[in-house]
Every structure is written in C-alpha cells, then in structure tokens.
Amino acid sequence: MAGEGMVTCLGCHGQTLGQGAPPTVRERDGQRLLTMAASGKRLTVPVLQDPAHDRYGGRVGCQVCHAQWSFTDRGHHLLRQDEPDFEPWESLTRQGSGEVEARLEGALFGTEEPEATMSDGITGRPAAGIWLQAYELRRWEEINTCLDREGILQVCRPLLDLHLSYTDAEGEVVFDGVTPKAGTPVLIPYTPHTTGRAGAFYQQRLRGLEGE
C-alpha cells in the first residue's frame, strides 16, 4: 500500500488524477501534463488504456509489465577481511562503495599503505575489518517476480542470496559461506527504475500469478 503523500503510478496514469500524483502534474485543456521543474517544459502524461490494466491491475504491480530490465544478482558473497591482503581483489575493485573502492585502488595501484579498515555503518567511525563483495552471477536482464505480503505479483530481486565469510588479521578463517536460515525467502520485492512501455510478451511475466 502506498503511504500518505507517496507518488504512485496510478496517481498520475489512472483514469482520474489521484492523490498519488505530484503537484507538477495537472489537467489542462483536456490533457494531463507534467511541468518540468527546471525548464518549465510540459510533457503529456499517458493515461491507462490497455484492457490488461482492468484485468490484472489489482493483482499485479505496474513494474512487472513495464520494467525494461532488472538486477538479477545470484550468489552475493560478502567477506569481512581483517588482513590487508588485497592482491586477490585486483580485478574486483568495483565494490559499490566509494570508501571500499578508494581503499582497494589506493593500496593496489597507488601509494597508500594497505589497511583493512572502513567506517562503521551506524556510528560512522573507523573500525577494524573491511567488507568486500563479489557475485557468482550478475545480470541486468531477466525480470524475476514473486508475490508480496499482500499477494500482489511484484518484480523481485535475490537480495537475500547471501553468503558471509570472515578471515581475521592472521588470515585464519573464522566462518565461511554462512547463509540465511532455512526458509528465508531469497527473492524480495523491489522497484527497478527502468520503467517503459510494456513489451509484446508481457504475459510471460505473469506466470507467477495464480489462475494464469
């Protein structure tokens, strides 16, 4: 359910302009227009017309059909390393964290002394150990779907396909390949920011919907 004040797809694109529309979207001269904040340019906002919206709208999230692609990260490995041995990571310096990337690149390709520390995510203070990540498989294509808590089919991402490992300052393995407890759902609903026109084969994405 959308929270109060939250912008929603139907707020702008529904048959009537709803509460989930930003103030920059208004009806003018029989058209629904979005006024760009920076330039003042007005863009036409399309209104739902395909009968698929009436058939599936209450059971399917908009992005299931309209997302152009999604992250499909399989086997997300997170390794805490207290030993500043970064040579094995020379080809994996893209870490999704500016701090970690600067630490790796400085030690591997710059003049910085290797140091296995990073900021604590809660306090912001430097702490011993650095978390490094890698994936068994990375794709930005296939749309995965699953049912959310309300039974609505949504785009999902394997966010909890996690494997945790830890080596201490002496290089000893403290634990290796720890995964979430049995029964934890791997696929978690999320919203990809890749919205566009629904493809010709959108119904293939509805296979996870009961009765289809």
Image (cartoon, rainbow, N blue to C red):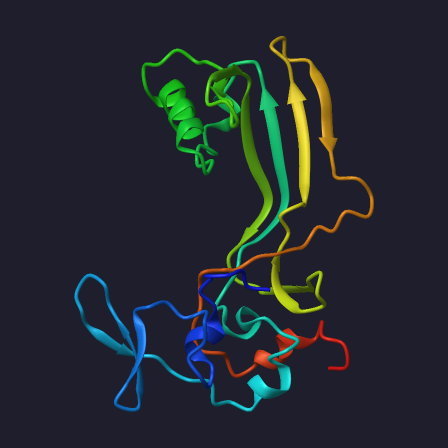
Quadrant position of residue 27 = bottom left
Quadrant position of residue 56 = bottom right
Q: In this view, does 13 lie to the left or right of 153?
A: left
- Relative height, residue 124 to residue 77 (above, below): above
- Relative height, residue 143 to residue 126 (above, below): below
Choose between 156 and 88: the one closer to the eye.
156
Quadrant position of residue 106 = top left
Q: Where is residue 94 in the image (x, y as percent from the top left)?
A: 44, 37
Q: Residue at x 42, y 79 (%)?
A: 17
Q: Is residue 58 left or right of residue 112?
A: right
Q: Residue at x 46, y 23 (%)?
A: 124
The count of marks equals: 0
Quadrant placement of the N terminus: bottom right
Q: Where is residue 22 in the image (x, y as percent from the top left)?
A: 37, 67
- Relative height, residue 76 to residue 186 (above, below): above
Q: Is residue 63 left or right of residue 101?
A: right
